[in-house]
Image (spheres, coloured by chain):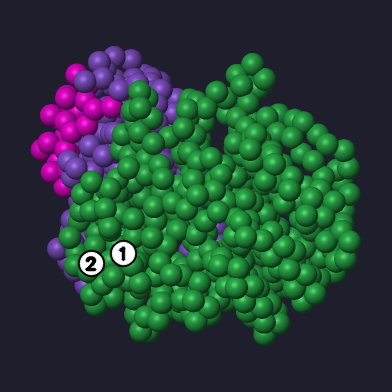
Chain colours: A purple, B green
Amino acid sequence: MKAVLLGATSGMGRALSRLLAERGESLFLLGIPADDLSRSAKDLEARGAREVGWLECDLLQPKGFAGALERADQALGGFDLVVVSAGLFGSQERLEADPEFCQKLLAANFANTVAFCEEARKRMLPRGGGTLCVFSSVAGERGRKPVVLYGAAKAGLTRYLEGLDHKFRGEGLVTITVKPGFVKTSMTEGLKPPPFAGDPEGVARQVLRAIDRGTPVVYAPPMWALVMLVIRNLPRFVMRRIGF
Amino acid sequence: MTELSGWGRYPVVEGMERASENFEAATASAALSRGLGRSYGDASLPASPADVVANSRRADRILGFDPGSGVLRAEAGLSLRDLNRVFLRRGWASPVSPGTQYVTLGGMVASDVHGGNHHVAGTFGEHVRSLRMRVADGRVLEVSEQTEPELFRATLGGMGLTGHILEVELKMERIPSAWLYTETRRVADIDDLVETLLESSRRWPMTKTWFDSTQRGPGMGRGFAVMGRWAEAGEAPPQPPLLRERLSVPPLPIGLVNALTVSVFNKLWFHSQSRPRAAIAHPQAFFWPLDGLLHWNRLYGPRGFAQYQCVLPIERDTRVVRRFFAIMTRRGCPSPVSVIKDCGAEGRGLLSFPKPGISIALDVPLRGERTQALVDALNEIVLEAGGRVYMAKDVLTRGTHFRAMEPRLPHFLEVRRKWDPERRLRSALSVRLLGDDV
């Protein structure tokens, strides 16, 4: 596989990139800042990646997406896997209090992620497709009090990815939507982990299996599929009362 | 605020822990660093709830490996387990392995860990070439024998009190296979055990023993001696060994480790192998047998346990080991994991634990004053014999005992004074043993 990864320097993206490296795949890292990318590239080389390139690409600067993917394409000789695990997180309190940050988060997690995927799609489709694996969230499953804003962006992203998969799977472009529940990473540092909290390595193993099999939707850890099945079916008057 | 404790689950303190991939930034305002929390007592715990503890476990990138020389550089949070997973199959191993893989490189440096090969390889610190550190005034420096020899040596075994260890550069060991050739032999009592250990250390690169801490009288100190070396490629199975956990202990309302259960367990274990045995062993079974059982510290129940390890010099008199055992068994020491190992030469670290002699490690369930009295009594013998205790495992040693055991302490404190005159870097351990302010 020849993989482009946006956001592989930390958390679940880092864990997934290591599994790919251990299989000897060729990797190209996008993200910020340069120093972090170069350190992660060295790590992945030492762990067995065939080759690792990197380039700065900021999720908040969509103008750079086309150029970055062009460079990745050249370096890898045509990628067939794109993984997007970059994104912003903020608590509902912070997003309500800070409209500027809120605007930034909504743009990064929805509009810009979609723009990045569109660029990737345009490159992969003409050569027969490939796999697009994007980290959304269980927060997008239902309007919930603790994640009104974050969840709204993720809901939009989930729907986009679903549509993409329906429209282009026949042409060879497989879209995988990863919906992590609570996973213990830097993003959730300081929050109290609920009972079914996962770790990045476990999620990465699940996601890699999904990439290999073309599974369209991955709840990680798997228990969250059950939790969200219940949440999706709760009547509104119940959702209005509970704090979850 | 979170609750923090070491592997012995005692003491439990309130603290502010910060884990980040950007460990360097996280250490900027921190009083202490912490890795996987596998030191047993209070070494990785903050001196006060207001102190920030930077956690390194997410800073775990390998920054370079040279297959020609075996030199590896990595961020301090890289675990030995991850290192093994990546390198054992390629024919490289850490030159020194402590009893668990769930330790970080930074923790291995700070405790200057040792293993079954101490008599030939020395401590982990002997294989460390350079460290990247954040010192107390906030600067980030490359620290080695060449650039800052005093600080470097004070940091090996310095329990994180000389600065935050950000990156570690070490020389790995080339191994013929990732499996081990081992021989196991029963020993009848403490004299037989010490003699077997000293004799086999002349011929084997790795030796260790397990003994029955509850047996009194004639069979006192009976157990097994295990000798090992890396298996040659021709002896070993062709496939690399898989590292895995099989079972996990759930939180238990009461401890399962007590005088009765340990006495039964120790007897069964001792009688489980009566004949000498040679075998090809999995590295996990040889080096890290307890890693297969996740959360094994929960077996001791909510009150936790105390680990205790000391070294007794024996060049003047080997009978001190027998005296130590007599006091230990008389007072009652229900320890299921009791290990004796001969130590080789003292290393470079100013406060490194090992010195030539016999090292004894015990874990005992905490039973209030009785356990404190046991540790006090054992420390009296250690002090009299010119030995010392291992800070990474200790939780009950009194500051007065510790200071009396450590003639090297003034030198360490002098280096610490130079780099951290205000004692900004401190831990619950440094309060207990070095007399730092809370």
At x 39% / y 70%, what residue is drawn? B409
User: In the shown orientation, is residue B225 left or right of residue A4?
Assistant: right
* Residues marked 1 and 2 touching at CB (< 8 Å): yes
At x 42% / y 58%, what residue is drawn? B157
What's the mark number on residue B170? none
Q: Residues within 10 Å of mark 1 (few under 14, many from 20)?
A: many
Amino acid on which disc 2 is placed? Trp
Q: Is residue B36 magenta?
A: no
Q: Is residue A65 magenta?
A: yes
Q: Nearer the viewer, residue B243 or A11?
A: B243
The range drawn in magenta is A52-74
What's the mark number on residue B419? 2
At x 21% / y 25%, what residue is drawn? A72
Q: Quadrant of residue B274?
A: top right
Q: Which residue is mark 1?
A: B162
Element under disc 1: loop
Q: Position of residue B418 (x, y in %)?
A: 22, 69
